Image: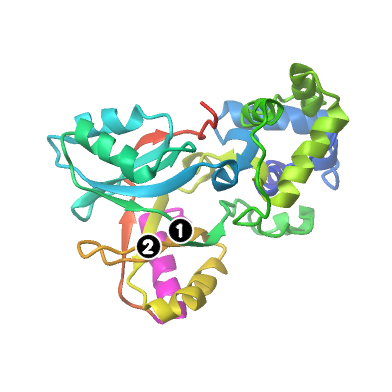
């Protein structure tokens, strides 16, 4: 992969331009045309480096409730459990993370009127009555997957880094039929054409300028956390990811969470409830090019936070990973 592609990957995963000709904007400073940018991004999608470019919503702002769930699954029950959990449309990610009794970890979002606890009980029953811990985010310190794909020397192409997106919304989403139609459209993969928002606007029977204004307004309010590309970690060199968990004193949670969130290797950082059988309440996801690199990152985080009571769980198998489709 050449430097231009690396810079494009860096730009589109941080923030995709919400304008009529976004590929022209992405070409600025790269000495290539908007057409070549489109061709390069299309090629990066074909190769699997880019999974999808779309709006990434704050599900809570749209009335959904979400949670991380840990399930204790024996080897014999694994196939049945995976089938039961993956069948629920609100499950977007599901991984095997061995190393403790709670070894299957998945994320779930449930629509208004339902609770994660009730849905997880149903899924647990379908999986054979397996123990499960519901671990919603009590507080979010960071939520932005931006992988460091640049190499030494690529800095000369770089523009100004964007700020981290808000972790919460400051407004209530109005679930009108028109707004729901827009959500269902812009959560899909962006068409790689010169005026992609115009194509979407035509399908919604809107003016392009009106759609651009709606998307921009939702981003400012936090209804949309980011409009960006999601990269395939392994395809861009990050073959390992680890979930680092700490048993952190309650009076240190906010201070420690801020420290962990300041590290670029950390993509997600949350406070979650602890249980007697699982006493960890602070979580940080780290990404590296090997398990050893993730372990080194975890050690640096622990030293910076002054907490050595931690463990790291590696994802060894991916059972499901897809963008959550809202209003299914």
Residue 218 locus on image (x, y percent): 72, 44
Asked whether the viewer can see residue 19, the reply is: yes
Task: From the viewer's side, name the closer residue of 120 and 17.
Answer: 120
The residue beneath circle 1 is 286
- Please, what is the dominant secondary structure of the magenta stretch? helix
Q: Residue at x 41, y 82 (%)?
A: 306
Q: Residue at x 59, y 41 (%)?
A: 62
Mark 1 element type? strand
Magenta stretch, residue numbers: 286-306
Residue 295 is covered by the magenta coloring: yes
Q: Residues within 10 Å of mark 2 (few under 14, many from 20)?
A: many
Give the left or right position of residue 302, taking residue 268 as reference: left
The numbered mark at residue 184 is none
Task: From the viewer's side, name the closer residue of 188 and 39.
Answer: 188
Residue 23 locus on image (x, y percent): 80, 35
In the image, is residue 166 above or below residue 179? below
Q: CA distance from mark 1 to mark 2?
A: 7 Å
Which of marks 2 and 1 precedes in the sequence?
2
Mark 2 element type? strand
Residue 41's quadrant in the figure? top right
In the image, is residue 6 above or below residue 307? above
Task: From the viewer's side, name the closer residue of 165 and 306.
Answer: 165
Give the left or right position of residue 118, taking residue 32 as reference: left
Q: Residue at x 55, y 47 (%)?
A: 60
The residue beneath circle 2 is 244
Asked whether the viewer can see residue 1, the reply is: no
Residue 275 locus on image (x, y percent): 26, 63
Residue 183's quadrant in the figure? top right
Q: Are marks 1 and 2 in contact (CB under 8 Å)?
A: yes
Instruction: Pick the quarter of the image with the N terminus.
Output: top right
In the image, is residue 78 above or below residue 262? above
């Amino acid at each position: 992969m050449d430097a231009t592609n690396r810079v494009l990957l860096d730009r589109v995963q941080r923030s995709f331009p919400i304008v009529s000709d976004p590929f022209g904007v992405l070409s600025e400073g790269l000495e290539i045309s908007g057409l070549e940018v489109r061709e390069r991004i299309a090629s990066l999608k074909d190769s699997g480096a880019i999974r999808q470019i779309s709006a990434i919503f704050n599900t809570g702002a749209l009335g959904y409730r979400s949670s991380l769930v840990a399930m204790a699954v024996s080897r014999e029950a694994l196939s049945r459990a995976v089938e039961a959990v993956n069948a629920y449309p609100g499950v977007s990610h599901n991984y095997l993370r061995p190393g403790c009794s709670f070894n299957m970890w998945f994320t779930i979002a449930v629509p208004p009127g339902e609770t994660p606890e009730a849905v997880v009980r149903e899924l647990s029953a379908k999986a054979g009555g397996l123990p499960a811990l519901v671990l919603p985010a009590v507080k979010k310190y960071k939520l932005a997957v931006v992988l460091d794909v640049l190499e030494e020397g690529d800095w000369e192409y770089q523009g100004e880094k964007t700020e981290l997106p808000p972790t919460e919304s400051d407004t209530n989403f109005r679930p009108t039929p028109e707004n729901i139609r827009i959500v269902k459209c812009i959560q899909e993969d962006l068409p790689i054409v010169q005026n992609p928002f115009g194509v979407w606007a035509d399908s919604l029977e809107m003016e392009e300028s009106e759609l651009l204004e709606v998307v921009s307004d939702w981003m400012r309010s936090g209804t949309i956390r980011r409009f960006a590309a999601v990269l395939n970690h392994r395809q861009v060199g990050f073959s390992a990811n680890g979930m680092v968990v700490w048993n952190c004193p309650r009076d240190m949670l906010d201070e420690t969470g801020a420290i962990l969130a300041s590290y670029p290797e950390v993509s997600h950082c949350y406070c979650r409830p602890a249980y007697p059988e699982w006493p960890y309440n602070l979580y940080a996801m780290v990404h590296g090019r090997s398990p050893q690199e993730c372990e080194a990152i975890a050690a640096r985080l622990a030293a910076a936070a002054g907490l050595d009571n931690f463990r790291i769980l590696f994802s060894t198998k991916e059972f499901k990973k897809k963008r959550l489709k809202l209003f299914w």
